[in-house]
Image (cartoon, rainbow, N blue to C red):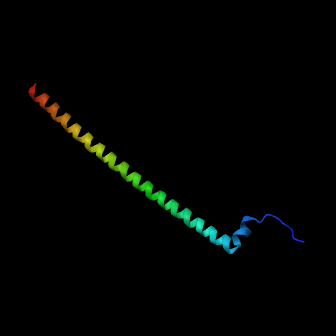
Amino acid sequence: MAVSFPISRSIKNMTARGVAQERRSNRIFKEDRKRDREKERKREKEKEKEREKDRRQCRRILKRVKIRRKDNIDTR
């Protein structure tokens, strides 16, 4: 007389197939997280480049304005 009952997750994972699948899914999950971190780093680098570009542009504009102001003061 066989009694059927749902196998709990921990017992299921003790089987060789369950353990192998768990390892596989963990590895895949780990690789996905690693890929996500790399993408995030790349995005941060791009943002930093943009910020630096903007800073340089602002400096140039400020220098021009300062030069113009000096010229105006000199002519007065």
* Nearer the observer, 74 or 13: 13
Please, is residue 33 above or below residue 3 in the view? above
Residue at figure coordinates x 27%, y 40% from the top left? 58
Please, is residue 16 above or below residue 58 in the view? below
Residue at figure coordinates x 70%, y 72% from the top left? 14
Is residue 57 left or right of 47 when viewed as pictured?
A: left
The quarter of the displayed image where residue 62 is located = top left
Position of the N terminus, as image quadrant, is bottom right
Please, is residue 38 above or below residue 3 in the view? above
* Nearer the observer, 30 or 54: 30
Is residue 29 left or right of 45 when viewed as pictured?
A: right
Q: Position of residue 9 (x, y in %)?
A: 72, 65
The residue furthest top is 76
Position of the C terminus, as image quadrant, is top left
Q: Position of residue 54 (x, y in %)?
A: 30, 43
The residue furthest bottom is 16
Residue at figure coordinates x 20%, y 34% from the top left? 65
Q: Position of residue 55 (x, y in %)?
A: 29, 43
The quarter of the displayed image where residue 15 is located = bottom right
The quarter of the displayed image where residue 73 is located = top left
* Nearer the observer, 72 or 5: 5
